[in-house]
Image (cartoon, rainbow, N blue to C red):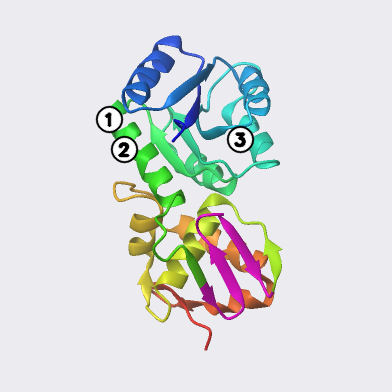
């Protein structure tokens, strides 16, 4: 199997080298960019980038601008790095479609674990690769969703949420449990992130958005009844 290619974007060369060394040891191919403009040039010239690790504070274009531009054309997983630990920044990142959010300084080993977790979730095994309920067809291998035969364009996290809901049809899921499963076991974030993503997911699902029931004071449940 061809090694997955990861784009690492940071204006600090020492940080890029540190991340690159650990990812390379784990078998990934790494391409680097030193600012936002270079990152976009590389991303759109390389058609096979499987994941982006993106710093926020950079010259030319910052991480938010780069993320927004990428999300206009691609749902590639994005991990955002930041020296700031601000809840507003974190929520903004998830609003833009960021998949993981890591504050500096961080352990390179933890970063690699986050990368592997994202890729593991997006590349499921053949077992239960397809899910079907209430006219909703979800194919994990192709990362595609159709509702009543019509394709629905979901972000990476929206897709993971829907898959998790469908896998647990009829089961009440707490926000904490959803957060731990979809946002990784060691992610400690605001559970309001769940509500934001569920709202967007329901909107994209149209009438079938009502299959995701709110369990007041707890979380959500997927049910076609």
User: In the drawing, does residue 106 fall left or right of residue 32?
Assistant: left
What's the CA distance linking mark 3 and mark 2?
Answer: 22 Å
Number of numbered labels in the structure image:
3
Q: Is residue 183 above or below residue 202?
A: above
**Residue at 34% across / 47% down in the picture?**
187
Q: Quadrant of residue 209?
A: bottom right
Q: Which residue is mark 3?
A: 67
Q: Is residue 165 above or below residue 1?
A: below
Res 113 label:
2
Q: Are discs 2 and 1 less than 8 Å apart at CB?
A: yes
- Residue 192 in the image, given as x and y percentages of width and height: 46, 58
**Residue at 43% across / 39% down in the picture?**
101
**Residue at 29% across / 34% down in the picture?**
110
Q: How would you rate the neighbour count of disc 3 (Cα within 10 Å): few for under 14, some for 14-19, many for 20 or more?
A: many
- Residue 150 in the image, given as x and y percentages of width and height: 72, 68
Q: Is residue 19 above or below residue 185?
A: above
- Residue 224 in the image, given as x and y percentages of width and height: 53, 84
| Residue 93 visible from this viewpoint | yes
Dot 1 falls on a residue whose secondary structure is helix
Q: Which residue is mark 1?
A: 109
Specify the segment rendered in magenta: 132-148
Dot 2 falls on a residue whose secondary structure is helix
Q: How would you rate the neighbour count of disc 2 (Cα within 10 Å): few for under 14, some for 14-19, many for 20 or more?
A: some
Report the mark closest to the observer, 1 or 3: 1
Q: Are discs 1 and 3 less than 8 Å apart at CB?
A: no
């Amino acid at each position: 199997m061809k090694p997955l290619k990861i784009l690492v974007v940071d204006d600090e060369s020492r940080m890029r080298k540190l991340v690159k060394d650990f990812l390379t040891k784990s078998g990934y191919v790494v391409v680097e960019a030193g600012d936002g403009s270079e990152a976009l040039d590389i991303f759109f010239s390389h058609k096979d980038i499987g994941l982006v690790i993106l710093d926020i504070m950079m010259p030319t274009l910052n991480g938010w601008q780069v993320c927004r531009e990428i999300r206009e054309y691609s749902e590639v997983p994005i991990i955002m790095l930041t020296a700031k630990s601000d809840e507003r920044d974190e929520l903004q990142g998830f609003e833009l479609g960021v998949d993981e959010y890591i504050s500096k300084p961080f352990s390179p080993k933890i970063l690699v674990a986050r990368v592997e977790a994202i890729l593991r979730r997006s590349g499921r095994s053949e077992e239960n690769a397809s899910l079907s309920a209430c006219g909703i067809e979800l194919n994990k291998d192709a990362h595609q969703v159709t509702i009543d035969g019509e394709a629905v364009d979901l972000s990476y996290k929206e897709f993971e949420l829907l898959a998790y809901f469908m896998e647990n049809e009829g089961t009440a899921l707490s926000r904490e449990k959803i957060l731990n499963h979809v946002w990784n076991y060691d992610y400690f974030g605001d559970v309001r992130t769940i509500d934001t993503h569920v709202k967007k997911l329901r909107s994209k699902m149209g009438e079938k958005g009502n299959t995701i029931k709110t369990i007041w004071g707890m979380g959500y449940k997927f049910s076609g009844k």
